[in-house]
Image (cartoon, rainbow, N blue to C red):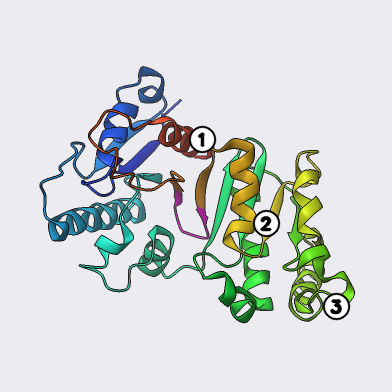
């Protein structure tokens, strides 16, 4: 059986990315899973200028994207980048997900995976005060569709069961604690049902995630970043990785930052990157 071809970007050379990539690929168990192509240096370089570090990270992302689109690799696993530093060379850069979406002209959403939990986000990196303003039925419906398709395509779940979290406490309690559930979330769910998607909601967030532990659903749609990330990281902090759904190729990422305070000290742990690599190989 032919092994999958996986590309790995090493992230910011001033962060932990290069060393955790090198450590992961020194693990015989990881090496036997796939054929790997590394994009970027695998040596920590604290003396490199911020400008050069940003250019190096951006170049590795661009080359990996080109390789995936040409079919030379089947998936991309990304090590962390420094967003602020990357904006020195790409003023529009807000994150990996947005970068890949723009490069491939794709509609995307972020799904976080750990154990048998899969949580997708409607809004991503927004101040909490902006979430109710920016939330709309079309984005919710798009996230539902992408999650449904992603579970079918990548996880081979033919008829995914989905649940949608409300925005407000008790999912708004019939409008007493907020009307977003009635005006925005419920119409998106109703349209998804008309499209044949099995979906529950909007549900009270304070009990929804407990019910996830009972394997009631295959995936959950969260309205904002911390609503989805707090429960899954509490469940499995070191094992949580991210998938970008909606791209023409599979992209899996670590769920931590560049950790520049420990880069080069030998304290960086490649465990989360190994989780991302294993998941990419499994899904390919």
Which span of residues is magenta-colored? 244-251
Q: Nearer the viewer, residue 237 or 163?
A: 237
| Residue at 55% across, 38% down | 237
Q: Nearer the viewer, residue 160 or 230?
A: 230
Q: Residue 54 at x, y = what percent?
A: 21, 58
* Element type where label 2 sits in the image: helix
Foreground disc of the pair 2, 3: 3
* Element type where label 3 sits in the image: helix
Report if residue 154 is visible in the image. no
Q: Disc 1 and disc 3: Cα gap in Å?
A: 38 Å
For label 1, the residue is 238
Residue 74 sits inside the magenta stretch: no
Residue 246 sits inside the magenta stretch: yes
The dot on residue 194 is none
For label 3, the residue is 175
Q: Is residue 270 above or below residue 179?
A: above
Residue that protrudes farthest toward the front in the picture: 261
Are dots 2 and 3 in contact, CB under 8 Å?
no
Q: Is residue 52 above or below residue 93?
A: above
Q: Earlier in the sequence, mark 2 or mark 1?
A: 2
* Element type where label 1 sits in the image: loop
């Amino acid at each position: 059986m032919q092994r999958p071809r996986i590309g790995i970007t090493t992230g910011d050379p001033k962060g932990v990315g290069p060393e955790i990539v090198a450590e992961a690929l020194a693990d015989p168990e990881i090496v036997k899973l796939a054929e790997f192509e590394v994009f970027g240096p695998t040596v920590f370089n604290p003396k490199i200028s911020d400008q050069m570090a940003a250019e190096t990270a951006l170049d590795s992302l661009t080359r990996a994207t080109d390789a995936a689109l040409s079919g030379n690799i089947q998936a991309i696993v990304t090590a962390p980048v420094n967003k602020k530093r990357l904006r020195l060379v790409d003023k529009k850069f807000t994150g990996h997900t947005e970068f890949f979406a723009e490069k491939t002209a794709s509609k995307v959403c972020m799904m976080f995976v750990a154990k048998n939990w899969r949580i997708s986000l409607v809004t991503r990196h927004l101040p909490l005060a902006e979430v109710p303003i920016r939330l709309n039925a079309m984005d919710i419906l798009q996230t539902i569709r992408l999650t449904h398709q992603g579970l079918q395509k990548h996880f081979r779940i033919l008829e995914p069961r989905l649940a949608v979290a409300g925005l407000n406490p008790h999912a708004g309690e019939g409008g007493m604690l907020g009307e977003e559930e009635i005006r925005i979330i419920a119409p998106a769910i109703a349209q998804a049902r008309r499209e044949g998607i099995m979906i529950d909601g909007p549900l009270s967030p304070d009990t929804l995630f407990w019910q996830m532990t009972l394997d009631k659903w295959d995936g959950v749609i969260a309205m904002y970043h911390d609503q989805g990330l707090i429960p899954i990281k509490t469940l499995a902090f070191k094992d949580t990785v991210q998938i970008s759904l909606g791209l023409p190729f599979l992209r899996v990422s670590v769920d931590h930052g560049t950790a520049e305070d420990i880069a080069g000290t030998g304290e960086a742990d490649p465990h989360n990157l190994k989780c991302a690599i294993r998941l990419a190989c499994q899904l390919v």
